[in-house]
Image (cartoon, rainbow, N blue to C red):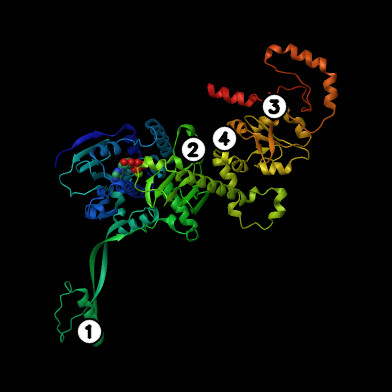
Amino acid sequence: RSSGEKFEFQAEVSRLMDIIINSLYSNKDIFLRELISNASDALDKIRFLALTDKDVLGEGDTAKLEIQIKLDKAKKILSIRDRGIGMTKEDLIKNLGTIAQSGTSGIKKINVFNVLVEKMQSSGDLNLIGQFGVGFYSAYLVADYIEVISKHSDDNQHVWESKADGKFTVSEDTWNEPLGRGTEIRLHLRDDAGGYLEGSKLKDLVKRYSEFINFPIHLWASKEVETEVPVEEDESAEEESETTSTEEEKEEDAEEEDSEKKQKTKKVKETVHEWELLNDVKAMWLRSPKEVTDEEYTKFYHSLAKDFSEEKPTAWSHFNAEGDVEFKAVLYVPPKAAHDQYESYYNSNKANLKLFVRRVFISDEFDELLPKYLSFLKGLVDSDTLPLNVSREMLQQHSSLKTIKKNLIRKTLDMIRKLAEEDPDEVHDDDKKDMEKSGENDEKKGQYTKFWKDFGKSIKLGIIEDASNRNRLAKLLRFETTKSNGKLTSLDQYIKRMKKGQKDVFYITGSSKKQLEKSPFLERLIKKGYEVIFFTDPVDEYLMQYLMDYEDKKFQNVSKEGLKVGKDSKVKELKEAFKDLTKWWKESLAGENVDDVKISNRLADTLCVVVTSKFGWSANMERIMQSQTL
Ligand code: ADP
Ligand code: MG
């Protein structure tokens, strides 16, 4: 066997492998779902290619889109084989030696990777590994030597091998059995990982972690079978060779036994091998939502999101759209925001929905399915209306996508609205009497507040970006006010509490509630019993440039010119009385960028205040803009 070509791992990969090898992380099971998920990805890729070129599937066994697991107890080898797309020599070097740079740009990937390594080091939790495109290396949790044998249609069969010592070798494979197409991962198990040679353990793990893989997973299982054979008796010295007897003969024997007098039998054990199917490949989303349990939805979420934290998703929606464009979809609000959810919002294009056409996985990089502000959702769409045998590019331009997108947004906003409606914390004191019957909803208590904390920013970005759903999104807004006592409240609640004669919704923007509470702009409003919204998130300033009105009410920034608080007959008199003073004042400040000096009724104790003009930036906006240009 030739010595092969030697390579070194990219420094980041080496670092990761060191962490994995030396990890005390007790849940080593995760390697199996990572390898199965890679096998499934590779099968998805070949099935996708087969849509436009049937010949790529090949013939005989090669055409079977499946995953096979074999255990070799004597040699302590666990192997996982798929008939997926396979890897060329170049693929092996790039994919299993460097950090995969698919989709997002390379630099971002490295940054994300460094965040991961830090997180894993500090928490000791490797569960996140699959979310960062480095799941393959988790195999070194259980193996000290790994061979990857792979055959891609563009290249000869090659073997990649490494003992995780900083280097790996790639050789042309002249000694293993030809794979036809696909990849076999051979794990030479560490001494402390012998448990993974037990068929029962693997079955268990596949059930637990890979339940929703859409390709059959087979285990080459050994089974002890007990067969009953008659005990030979002296008088009826029947000649029988048990090992060669056919089923038919056995049956005949059994009948004979029955008809004759009772005859003694003995049990014989033998070991047989057979492929055992471990999963149910029926796509979960095809089932009726009524038949799917909460637990199944939760598990499906985990497998979709590669999130195995065991946390329950905050909400989900599973529906079937009929009409001109038919599709099924399952949408999830994750249990919490991704660590980089809002970090790179404007330069990321990461959609998290998987698109299937008639059960065939097409892509998870379809930006056309959801607007950017909903990119926090996870889920999938399976459409029967979209054409199967066209390129991804053509599919991206298909007119049905617009309809699907519109539908998905609608359903998402419904799902979020329901989260609020079912949350007992969302029922405010003045409504309590209408909702006396609750009590069964303890589990839902606080769920909207939690959603808002994690994803409220997305709703605000939606108001800015999505004019056609602005009003629906505004209904989902939450904020604190001068009267909310530290709790969140909504625009609907605010409007309900508005004072008689109050026309506008009052708000003030700033960097914190604490700072705003001292603002002289609020003095008189509070004294007169008006409620003022605190907007303290930098994005709120932009938000309020887009949110002009809600339910026929206009928004009024109380630090800006034009504030009207009820009627005040005295103002006219005062204006007249102080005419000379204001005139003198304005003239003296003429060089100081002051537009005007006016008598106002907005203050209570403070003597004077500088306000922004109606159409200018608020002081808070100036502050935000300044911090951004620095
Ligand atoms: P990810 O799956 O997130 O890309 P992995 O570390 O699990 O990250 O795998 C790295 C890459 O190696 C994959 O993107 C794929 O290109 C390649 N790969 C791994 N396993 C297989 C396989 N069984 N068949 C084909 N390619 C594979
Ligand atoms: Mg993977």
Q: CA distance from mark 3 to mark 2?
A: 33 Å
Q: Which of marks 2 and 4 precedes in the sequence?
A: 2
Please tell me which residue lies in front, 230 or 192. 230
Please tell me which residue is depicted at 53% across the width and 47% down the height of the picture: 412
Q: Nearer the viewer, residue 74 or 173?
A: 173
Do the numbered discs 1 and 2 sit on residues whose CB atoms are within 8 Å? no
- Residue 138 occupies quadrant: top left
Number of other residues with Cα within 10 Å of mark 3, as a class: few under 14, some 14 to 19, many 20 or more: some
Q: Is residue 57 left or right of residue 333?
A: left
Judge the density around disc 1: few (<14), some (14-19), many (≥20) Cα neighbours within 10 Å: few
Between label 3 and label 1, give the one nearer the viewer.
3
x and y percentages locating residue 115 in the rendered image = 42, 35
Can residue 472 be seen? yes
Give the alpha-carbon distance from disc 1 to disc 4, as whole Å. Answer: 84 Å
Query: Which of marks 2 and 3 precedes in the sequence?
Result: 2
Mark 3 lies on a secondary structure that is: loop
Q: Please name the residue that numbered disc 2 is placed on.
A: 341
> Looking at the picture, does residue 473 appear above or below residue 274?
above
Contact? badges 4 and 3 (CB < 8 Å): no
Q: CA distance from mark 4 to mark 2?
A: 17 Å
What amino acid type should be assigned to the residue bearing mark 3?
A: Lys
Can residue 137 be seen here? The reply is: no
